[in-house]
Amino acid sequence: MPGVVYDPDTGVTTVRVWAPRWREAWLVVEAPVPVIHRLESEGDGHHTLVRNDLPPGTLYWFRDPDGHLRPDPASRSQPQGVHGPSRVVELPPPSLPEGWGPSIPWEDWVIQEIHVGTFTPEGTLDAAVGPLSGLRSIGINAVELMPVHQFAGARNWGYDAVGLWAVQNTYGGPEGLRRFVEGAHASGMAVILDVIYNHVGPEGNYLAELGPYFSDRYRVPWGQTWNLDGPDSDAVREYLVENAGYWASAFGVDALRLDAVHALFDMSPVHIVAEIGQRLRRDPATRRCRVIAESDLNDPRVVRPPARGGWGCDAQWADDFHHALHAVLTGEKGGYYQDFGKLASLARAHRTPFVYAGQYSAYRRRRHGASARGLPPHRFVVCGQNHDQVGNRPAGDRWAGHLDPELVKVGLGLVLLSPYIPLVFMGEEYGEENPFLFFTDFSDPAVVAATRKGREEELRAWGSPGPFPDPQDPRTFEKSRLDRSRAQGPSGLQRQAYVRELLDLRRRGGPTFRRYPQSVRASERSRILTIRRPYSSGWIWEIAALTFGPKELRLPGLRESFDCLLDSRESRWGGPSPSEPPSLGASPDTLRVVGPGLWLIQPSREGVR
């Protein structure tokens, strides 16, 4: 394993670095008088050293043949940031609750995505443990951390990381992550870690000096991309694959979310994503860790088993569900939303995770995607809001900032009751209104200028005239912090009660409820989506009305009476008072509703044909 690894049983520290561009390498230990140790060359670009006088807490550098001091490319801790010395750490094997792995079946996961720096006023991993019990009490049982890899400065989304083995020092370092995972498990929460294997950030990245870590054959818009299939790529692949195992074995995380796997360019016989899965399953200490991929390819190969030519991921994000839902709620047509907007797309997203499964995409100006036929819904994660879909808006505004509250509840309900694995963005469960903006804290003037320019160009490409928040301005970051006082206000408590009810209905529906619906109908004229779904006690109609005013719709199988399992417009959820509950229509098999709203209707025993 690369880096400096301390063995607490023997007191021995093993040093290993892959630096084929260095003829020689030295370890420089920081002390009143620096101590220098020469590493032995293994002849394949690796340099190694074994010592018994490098205890945890030791600060050190690597020195190249020209005398430059560089942080460890596999540093576990950077207490002074990306440009400072590395630190030896001790991480004994994590303690996991007995039987933890199977205690939350994957099909039952409900995920909240959080950004550590804005999740609490303190912005640390230790502080982030506090709100978890509240999330668990309303039915959310998994938390996904946006990247905590070491990045430049104190403020960043985490996708500009350069220290893939280190935990951000301002978040609490590796010890803070260990305490967070243990605290989450104690609260009954699984932990997903967002990891970045498709690029490296622009500041503090010294890897190119050491060896051919990066490719000159492929380009991504976010920074240098890894050399996964070119000459000398074996050591680079080992660096990334072992990194995946490290988070599972050293910290006990329950799943890894692989960022933008469509930007992992790899023509090798075994794709790097598949190799990461194989590595995790091979080791008893890591085989319980799941792999979730973010992909915009609409390619079922991502989650198909290797025996069927797939990459073997446990699940992948299905963005089409978000796009279809957001477009019908907001009416927005910019960017990829031009491919959506009709209620028929949202209906299709309930029947299959990929709305585009080989059809022509006007946004891409080509056919896009492939069929996911035969793959169960729990192979896909869906959301109505996440860091990208909120943070990449010019104003970083959430649904709560620009949608009618009744429409927000409809959207939230359609996500949480979907057949897929649902994900909500931090604060969504209580109606957070603060924006989530794009923020950075670079110190390199050239990087700062390029970041500002790139951000402006990206937003203008979506038709936004500006002006835009300055990513480098600390106020941009401060505006993005959650206002947790809202969670204890009347509307916040009502929203959390609504989420609790939705998730309780999801749980009570049993395994059959998490299958694809029996039928889905969309009326573009009346803007009503009607879904017939299996339920533990028979079947139900899920009705979403996306326009205001009364509507009457036909529900085959409904005769004289019914039970309303959920009415999103009830006053206890913050709905209009007095509200008009669903009622039987003027003719058989019809129901009268007043929208916008979401209802779960179950024919009562005497009302079923």
Image: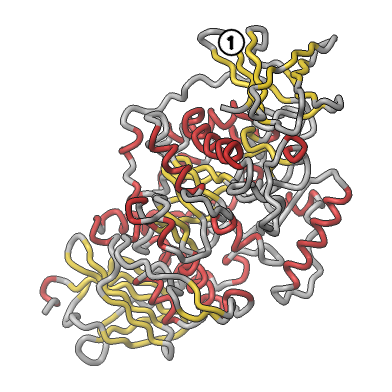
Residue 578 visible at all: no
Pointer 1 residue? 12
- Left or right position of 224 against 262: right
Going 47% across and 83% down the picture, which residue do you hit? 342
> In the rendered image, is residue 170 in sight?
yes
Q: How many marks?
A: 1
What kind of element bears circle 1?
A: strand
Relative to residue 190, is residue 442 drawn left or right? right
Residue 457 point in image, percent of width and height: 77, 68
Colour scheme in the image?
A: secondary structure
Task: Say which of 177 and 83 sits in front.
Answer: 83
Residue type for callout 1: Val
Percent x, y of residue 218:
66, 57
Residue 254, image quadrant:
top left
Horizontal side of 525 relative to 145 (left or right) equals left
Q: Residue 105, located in which quarter of the rendered image?
A: top left
Examine the rendered structure and indicate whether residue 207 appears above or below residue 546.
above
Q: Position of residue 338 (x, y in %)?
A: 58, 80
Specify the quadrant that holds the N terminus: top right
Q: Is residue 480 above or below residue 548?
A: above
Q: Quadrant of the C terminus?
A: bottom left
Question: At 25% from the left edge and 86% from the top edge, which residue is drawn?
Answer: 590
The structure residue drawn at horizontal position 39% and vertical position 72%, both measured from the top left corner, is 598
Q: Residues within 10 Å of mark 1 (few under 14, many from 20)?
A: some
- Residue 546, how many percent across, how many down? 45, 79
Q: Nearer the viewer, residue 512 or 249?
A: 249
Instruction: Check the image and name the residue furthest to the right.
Output: 445
Q: Quadrant of residue 98?
A: top left
